[in-house]
Amino acid sequence: MLLWVGLGNPEPGMARNRHNIGFLAVDTIAIRHGFTPWRQRFKGLVSAGSIAGEKILALKPQTYMNESGASVQQAAAFYKLPSDAITAFHDELDLVPGKVRVKRGGGAAGHNGLRSMDRILGTQDYWRVRLGIGHPGDKERVLGHVLGDFVKQDRDWLLPLLDAVADAAPLLVQSKPEDFMTKIALLMQDVK
């Protein structure tokens, strides 16, 4: 079993924030691959399904970003999952909009959801799917950018990106992160 965690904030008014792209990604994966309806569990919302023959538990912590680790830890402990069975889908300022990078381990780079997971799980050794939202260019504008809503023009790259992540998901299951990133890049190459 794999635990795929979308990071975001549960407040309805924050649903379209750039910070919630992790929620959007796991929502799209769950829809595309016919997962169960979302239900409350582990201080979050969970949906289960199967991709490439592997059982996946999708989790959207409802603890707010700063306490995401509490929800992730409960789910991981219940299923006795090692850290390398956990993948966090999250927004990444240091990638241009529409770009995706996958890595295992590493620091939180100022991301409060990752920082919470690192602290509560006691490890940084889980997978991260970094979903580019771009940097506003000025450090003083970062908070407003991250907590700001996607704008109309963002739909041109955001919806194709979410579809590409869902289409390429079987490659993540098969432990082929390079192929996953390549497939997304190919699917996104005509997106402006």
Image (cartoon, rainbow, N blue to C red):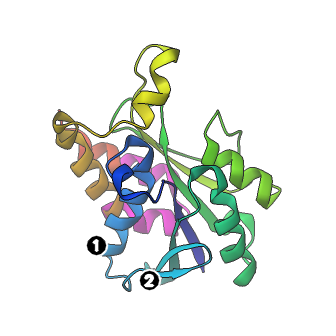
For the residue pair 7 and 4, the one nearer the viewer reads as 7
Mark closer to the chain start, 2 or 1: 1
Could you tell me if the residues under marks 2 and 1 are in contact, i.e. CB atoms within 8 Å? no
In what element is the residue under mark 2?
strand
Residue 182 percent coordinates (x, y): 38, 46
For the record, the magenta segment spans 167-182
Q: Which residue position holds label 2? A: 50
Q: Which mark is residue 32?
A: 1
Q: Amino acid at mark 2?
A: Ser
At x 63%, y 65%, the residue is 86
Asked whether residue 118 is drawn in magenta, I would say no
Magenta stretch, main secondary structure class: helix
Indicate left or right for 156 with 140 as reference. left
User: In percent of the image, x 65 and y 67: which residue is there?
Assistant: 72
Residue 71: horizontal and vertical position, in percent? 64, 68
Q: Spot the residue most to the top.
A: 138
For label 1, the SS is helix
